[in-house]
Amino acid sequence: MIEIRNVSIIREGIYILKGVSLSIKKGEFVAIVGPNGAGKTTLLDVITGFIKPTEGVVVINNKRSDTKIYTGENIGYVFQEEYSRSNIPLTVEDVVCIGGYKRSGGSFFHLKGNPGLIDKALEEVGISNLKHRNVSNLSGGERRKVSIARELSREVEALLLDEVLANLDPPAQIDINGLIQRLHEELGITIVFVTHLLHYLPERVERIVGLKNGEVLFDNPRSRITSGMLAELYGCDENKLSKYVGTFRI
Amino acid sequence: MWELFGYKFFQYALIAALLGGASLGIVGVWVVLIGIPFIGVALSHAAFAGGVVGMLLGINPVFMAFVFSLIASLSIGPLSERSRIEPNISIGIIFSLVLGIAFLGIGFMKGSRNEAFSLIWGSILTLSRWDILMITVFFFFVLLFLLKFNMEIKAIIYNKKVAHVAGIPVSRIFYLLLFVTGFTVTVNLNTVGGLLIFSLLINPSSAASLIAKRIEQMYLLSALFGVVSCVCGLLVSALFNVPSGSVIIIVSSVIFLVTFLLNRRRIAEKRV
């Protein structure tokens, strides 16, 4: 479904991504891990076409994303922090509506006239009761659910999730983690899950990709990942890392 | 006071206050929520520079003001995107350039410079039939633009990256926003003047942002505050023979202050 072929991003002579090749099949649950500045978010930006690769190509469902053809229709993207202001006069319905832009033929009037898609997405993530609430007054967990609902409102095949558990309290992390796993299990949505929380990888993660300095250090099934590989990825002592994250549930 | 309403110049001024105040109030919502407040200063001074260049070259100053405002508004977007600098920085660069052009033009002028300076201070009581026609046309243009692109604008205000992923042509809509803002500022330049129009973009919408829960409420309140500022300024100016632009801006600042004081508890609660 998502083919990344030898992609490099070069800025001011520095490689942000270097010769990255990845193939993500429909229905897979892939975690991408790596230290800060490894290029994880840049990789997601390249997949969605937000950043054009300096070298290489990204192919989504047999369409090259570096052409002018819009390829993001089937790919949802949830960012770590989407709120540029503390006070935004928008409701949950307004934000979820954004996701269905292309599906409504480029006009929001159509989507407004067909609230079925929005209601269905809100119901899927369990926040139908928040539909008319101002987004500025929501908790961190509720905000992440609104973002996920927004992407579901265009019935995406894949969800790219960038640190969606960051800055959430444990109950909210458990809640969002459960929601993501349910979307994978029940709707068959392909999940690409970027995270730092090694001790809290969703149980359904099948494959882990380690990214370091813009390069793929390892790309293995979960069962073949060792604490030594992760210690090498983060460039720290294996025992110290084990103590910090507890026993790896990998 | 009532006899004033019988005079043509006052009727024109009243129309300008109502429609200009409302359109600046609406445009101000975009400026405040997208976080580019300085744009009003840059565009109004671009229009001022255009007017000065027009006077020097013997071309209609209003036409040249439009041309300069258009060039400035269409330069800000690409400049910030292609050079990867903040929009507010590119606005600052354009602002300093047009200010230099304006004062260079004034330096070359022979004879009275009053006409050029009237673009800075504005004079709501001396508007022509042509000015009123333009203000009216652009008021409806702003309304139509808002109705057509309301949801795209909401998406850009929320998060440009999210809007891009959803397939919204973010750059195109953003340039259109700058373009409409530039033209709205230019047609209303004579009402409050280039130096003060900035406040009429910022104060009503900032006051509205303190109490509005939905963006539609914010548009309505901001337009209302803009109209109240302009009409109060006009009446005080006509009754006490004081500069209209200054009074309009003071009234808009007072509206913001009163709104803030009346809602300070709610604003403090929101921050916790």
Image (tube, coloured by chain):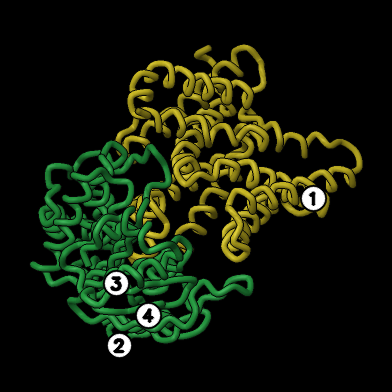
Chain colours: A green, B yellow
Residue B160: percent from the left, percent from the top?
Answer: 42, 57
Residue A197: percent from the left, percent from the top?
Answer: 30, 57
Q: CA distance from mark 1 to mark 3?
A: 66 Å
Q: CA distance from mark 2 to mark 3?
A: 34 Å
Q: Is residue B133 left or right of residue B245?
A: left
Q: Which residue in the structure is indicated by mark 2?
A: A62
For the residue marked with disc 2, what is the amino acid? Asn
Marks 1 and 3 close (CB-CB < 8 Å) = no
Q: Which residue in the structure is indicated by mark 1?
A: B101
Marks 2 and 3 close (CB-CB < 8 Å) = no
Residue B226 lies, with reference to residue B44, above or below; the image says: above
Chain of the residue that carries numbered disc 2 in the rendered image: A
Marks 4 and 2 close (CB-CB < 8 Å) = no
Q: Same chain for marks 1 and 4? A: no
Of residues B86 and B58, the one drawn nearer to the viewer in this rendering: B86
> Closer to us: mark 1 or mark 2?
2
For the residue marked with disc 4, what is the amino acid? Ile
Chain of the residue that carries numbered disc 3 in the rendered image: A
Residue A226: percent from the left, percent from the top?
Answer: 29, 72
Q: Looking at the image, can residue B18 be seen? A: yes
Of residues B213 and A157, the one drawn nearer to the viewer in this rendering: A157
Q: Which residue in the structure is indicated by mark 3?
A: A226
Residue B74: percent from the left, percent from the top?
Answer: 59, 59
